[in-house]
């Protein structure tokens, strides 16, 4: 039987200055939940990409805004959710980006969503009462 | 908080950038500034040594995506070396190894540059 453990939460300003802090928060708990180093690295990068997307796209780099990060785990899975109140984002498409084409057009970005899907087992986007949630799960 | 730095040195005619720490959406601008300056100074045979790079997010990859075309148009390249497996994995997930020279050592990058020149 899956046994629930405590959930954890931090609230951080929507600023890239806090990326390292967010990565550490998530990586420490992922390690404590029993994941191997490479799986912890996957979760850390997925959360980095999701948080960066919120800062840039949901909040348009407005540092006055904040992001809630919640996580929890049991003996079957680890989940982490990021909540914001900015512009909603629900990518319908998450094909592998064509890096060759992007390079040609000197474009960057637009690869985070694909990475998140690759790194995590399940990704859900939801908007309720102007609160956007991205919830990502990795199975044990 | 400082969790990323770049050391720039010359090896023969090549510009080597040694990256240390974590390259993310916060620190990517440092690399961007450095690369831009090299390109402005007509230095476009660039080797990026990733031996001390512990972490990269897509914002870091984005810097390489944004400038590689300029550098190649000028007859140069950005070659990446000494990546640890975790960092390489991120490049690999997006298919970078078919588009960029990612090699073991700086000497391998120099050899590649020499091959490029003779082609």
Image (spheres, rainbow, N blue to C red):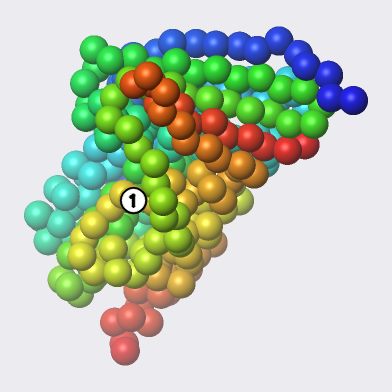
| Residue at screen point 49% across, 49% down | A115
In the depicted structure, whether residue A132 falls above or below residue B91: above
In the depicted structure, whether residue A52 falls above or below residue B70: above
Locate the N terminus of chain B and report the quarter of the image it occupies. top left
> In the visual, does A91 lie left or right of B105?
left
Please provide percent x and percent y for residue A123. Answer: 55, 40
Q: Nearer the viewer, residue A112 or A92?
A: A92
Locate the C terminus of chain B and report the quarter of the image it occupies. bottom left
User: Which residue, as the protein is rendered here, is positioned at the far front?
Assistant: A129
Q: Nearer the viewer, residue B2 or B95?
A: B95
Tag 1 subunit: A
Residue A66 in sight: yes
Q: Nearer the viewer, residue B111 or A102?
A: A102
> In the visual, does A122 lie left or right of A4?
left
Secondary structure under tag 1 reads: loop
> Pointer 1: what residue?
A110
Please provide percent x and percent y for residue B24. Answer: 38, 36
Residue A45 in sight: no
> In the visual, does A103 lie left or right of A94?
left
Residue A43 appears in which quarter of the rendering? top right
């Amino acid at each position: 039987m899956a046994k629930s453990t405590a959930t954890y939460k931090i609230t951080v300003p929507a600023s890239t200055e806090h990326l390292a802090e967010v990565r550490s928060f998530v990586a420490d708990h992922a390690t404590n939940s029993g994941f191997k180093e490479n799986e912890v690295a996957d979760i850390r990068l997925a959360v980095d990409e999701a948080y960066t997307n919120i800062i840039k796209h949901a909040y348009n780099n407005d540092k006055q805004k904040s992001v809630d990060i919640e996580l929890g785990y049991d003996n079957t899975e680890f989940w982490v959710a990021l909540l914001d109140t900015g512009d909603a984002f629900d990518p319908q498409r998450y094909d592998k980006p064509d890096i060759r084409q992007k390079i040609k057009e000197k474009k960057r970005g637009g690869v985070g969503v694909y990475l998140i899907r690759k790194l995590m087992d399940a990704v859900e986007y939801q908007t309720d009462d102007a609160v956007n949630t991205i919830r990502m799960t990795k199975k044990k | 908080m400082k969790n990323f730095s770049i050391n720039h040195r010359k090896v023969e005619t090549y510009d080597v950038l040694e990256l240390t720490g974590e390259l993310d959406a916060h620190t990517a601008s440092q690399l961007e500034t450095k690369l831009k300056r090299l390109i402005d100074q007509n230095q476009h045979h660039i080797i990026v040594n990733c031996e001390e790079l512990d972490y990269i997010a897509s914002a870091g990859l984005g810097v390489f995506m944004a400038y590689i075309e300029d550098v190649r148009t000028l007859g140069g390249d950005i070659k990446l070396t000494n990546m640890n497996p975790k960092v390489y994995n991120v490049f690999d997930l997006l298919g970078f190894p078919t588009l960029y020279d990612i090699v073991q050592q700086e000497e391998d990058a120099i050899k590649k540059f020499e091959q490029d020149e003779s082609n």
